Image (cartoon, grey):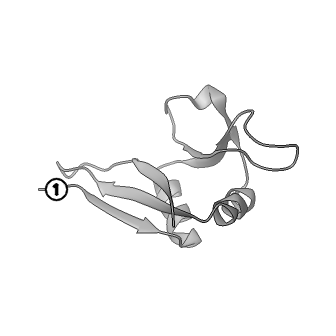
Amino acid sequence: MGSKSHTTTDHDEIRTWVEQHDGTPATVAGTGGDSEPGVLRIDFPSGAGQDRLDHVSWEDWFAKFEEEKLSFLYQEEKADGDDSTFFKLVSR
């Protein structure tokens, strides 16, 4: 059985998936300007690099998402059927 993934630009779908996995919108610290978010990420509990992430509002996160013309590719479940928090931001 293969893993299941999906790509979307729907803000509600993205937010729902992230929050179902206890994630928080974030940016990489030091990559943004004074009032502009930097490189987008999602901060999951016990995730790698969480000390280098700054939490941002969904409004700011989605503004940058749209400005950069990104899509959200996420894995619904792993090949073995377990839940997954894998995602990737890709160009539209």
What residue lies at 83% left-to-right and 43% top-to-bottom?
33
Other residues around mark 1 within 10 Å, as few (<14) / some (14–19) / many (≥20): few
Residue 59 percent across, percent down from the top left: 73, 62
The vertical placement of 48 against 41, above or below, is above
Amino acid carrying mark 1 in the image: Gly
Q: Residue furthest front?
A: 91
Q: Residue furthest left?
A: 1
Residue 55 percent across, percent down from the top left: 70, 43
**65 horizontally vs 57: left or right:** left
Residue 67 percent across, percent down from the top left: 70, 64
Question: Quick one: SS at disc 1?
Answer: loop
Residue 61 percent across, percent down from the top left: 68, 56
**68 horizontally vs 59: left or right:** left
Viewer-proximal residue among 17 and 4? 4
What residue lies at 22% left-to-right and 55% top-to-bottom?
3
Viewer-proximal residue among 35 and 90? 90
Q: Please tell me in which quadrant of the rendered image residue 29 appears.
A: top right
What residue lies at 81% left-to-right and 50% top-to-bottom?
36
The vertical placement of 45 against 87, above or below, is above
Question: Can you say which quadrant of the picture contains the N terminus?
Answer: bottom left
Viewer-proximal residue among 83 and 68? 68
* Residue with the mark numbered 1: 2
**64 horizontally vs 45: left or right:** right
The vertical placement of 48 against 81, above or below, is above
